[in-house]
Image: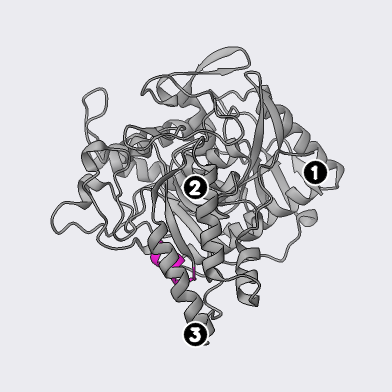
Amino acid sequence: MAYPKLTEESGLAETAEAIRSGDMSVAYAVDAAIVRLESLDGPINALAVPDFQRAYETAKAMDEAKANGAGPNPSQPLFGVPMTVKESFDVEGLQSCWGHESCTDYIAPRDSELVRRLKAAGAVIVGKTNVPVDLSDWQSFNPVYGRTNNPHNSERSPGGSSGGSAAVVAAGMVAGEYGTDIGGSVRVPAHFCGVWGHKTTWGIVSKRGHVHPMMARRPGFVAAHDGALSIAGPITRNAQDLATLTAIGSKYPLRQSTKRLKDCRLLAITEYPGAPVDASVGEPTEAAINALTDAGIRVDRSSDLVPDLEGQQAAYMRMLNTAMARGAPGPNGERASATDWYDMLDAQATKEAEWARLFEVYDYVLAPPAPVLAVPHVDGDKRVFDTTTRINSEDVPGAAGLAWAGIATFPNLPSTVLPIGTGTYEGAQLPCGMQVMGPHMADLDCIMAAQEIGNILHG
């Protein structure tokens, strides 16, 4: 089962090894990435904030340090590797406006913690990628940077809110990115663009320095906590690079099981109350599951251990809307009280416990990342969630698809998306991905399992 590739450019590990061995200079690697961005990005429009001059100066300094025996060291697995990050992460000296024209005057005074970690690992940040306004859509469009197109089909969305992230990776402009995810914002772009994405366990990757500019520019403001539900997660073109970026970003040591997929028990969840899946996603998903079972992998199709998904979705949407609004009044004019918030936390803890019981029996859960493949661009400034989505010839509320994001988001679980093939949606052949969910903190295990699944499907 094949899936479309746009590029044969090297990944993060290959580039790092070429630099380490002396086959490539940092300046060459960075200059080549800049050339790719300048030559390829025009019709895609994924790069929002370039930082080419500083990146090249950094590259030359790293080459000089390497020549003098000052690098790379074992703590720098990305020494000299060019990368981008999502526009919403603070990078010292660069604009971070989250798509708001009124916030283009905000210039980050310091790097976010994640960017500091990436730089400490040797990465060279060459720019930042496009997002929807307030990071709240499955498109990547705003009045400041314009619209990002899917590299596979310019009439389609690359996803959001990390749509620029997935687009630059899929098109081969850079080998890896870091985005964020609260409503599928890493997983859906990976799915739409045919690349790898990982939703990390909540809290393991710091989001300090990932703050709305309206708040960040307040005098004396310092964000000292990670927002509810939202995570930072990587997007790459292969599993090895995904694991590397996850480990670099994590504040905690991550366990890695030696258990092989053939010894695991998997559960496939392909139906969700109120969130139907289009055949363009359902058919490649079924084909992937059949390929796994043909390879001797045990995949159950139902279990009494699955939590009440309808109840979970309702609780997730309440918490999501409250978190995104930071407690401001909702569309009905009502504001969530402290009691309401604690009730949401109780509901979340209940689901966490229920999923933990399921993972005492199952090693991984397979699920679609979204109900459809890459959606056509929505006219005007409307969000995908404010319109309807065509699913199996019927119009379904766009927000219903968030259920497939919330399945891992609400219980704070890790989930890896890998490309599994293609489907035809609304007349276009497009990439399709699949989620591999695992227990709390089993991030590297999810990535490893996804890699083994990918080997079975594409090997």
Image coordinates of residue 95 in percent, x first then y, are 29, 50
Question: Looking at the image, is mark 1 or mark 3 earlier in the sequence?
Answer: 3
Location of residue 99 by image quarter: top left
Image quadrant in which the N terminus is located: top right
**Could you tell me how many numbered marks the image carries?**
3
Query: What's the mark number on residue 455?
Result: none
Residue under the point 45% across and 32% down: 139
Label 3 belongs to which residue?
70
Question: Looking at the image, is mark 1 or mark 2 earlier in the sequence?
Answer: 2
Q: Which of 306 and 171 lies nearest the eye of the viewer?
A: 171
Q: Is residue 9 left or right of residue 299?
A: left
Amino acid type indicated by mark 2: Glu
What separation in Å lies between label 2 and label 3 (alpha carbons)? 31 Å
Image coordinates of residue 102 in percent, x first then y, are 21, 38
Q: Is label 3 in a helix, a strand or a loop?
A: loop
Question: Looking at the image, is mark 2 or mark 3 earlier in the sequence?
Answer: 2
Q: Is residue 53 left or right of residue 237?
A: left
Q: Are marks 1 and 3 in contact (CB under 8 Å)?
A: no
Residue under the point 34% across and 58% down: 91
Q: Is label 2 in a helix, a strand or a loop?
A: helix
Q: Which of 154 and 207 lies nearest the eye of the viewer?
A: 154
How many residues crowd around disc 2 within 10 Å: few (fewer than 14), some, or many (20 or more)?
A: few
Residue under the point 66% across and 42% down: 6
Amino acid type indicated by mark 3: Ala
Is residue 116 within the magenta segment?
yes
Query: What's the mark number on residue 292?
Result: 1
Image coordinates of residue 265 in percent, x first then y, are 74, 50
Amino acid type indicated by mark 1: Leu
Location of residue 404 by image quarter: top right
Residue sitting at the far bottom = 69
Is residue 42 within the magenta segment?
no
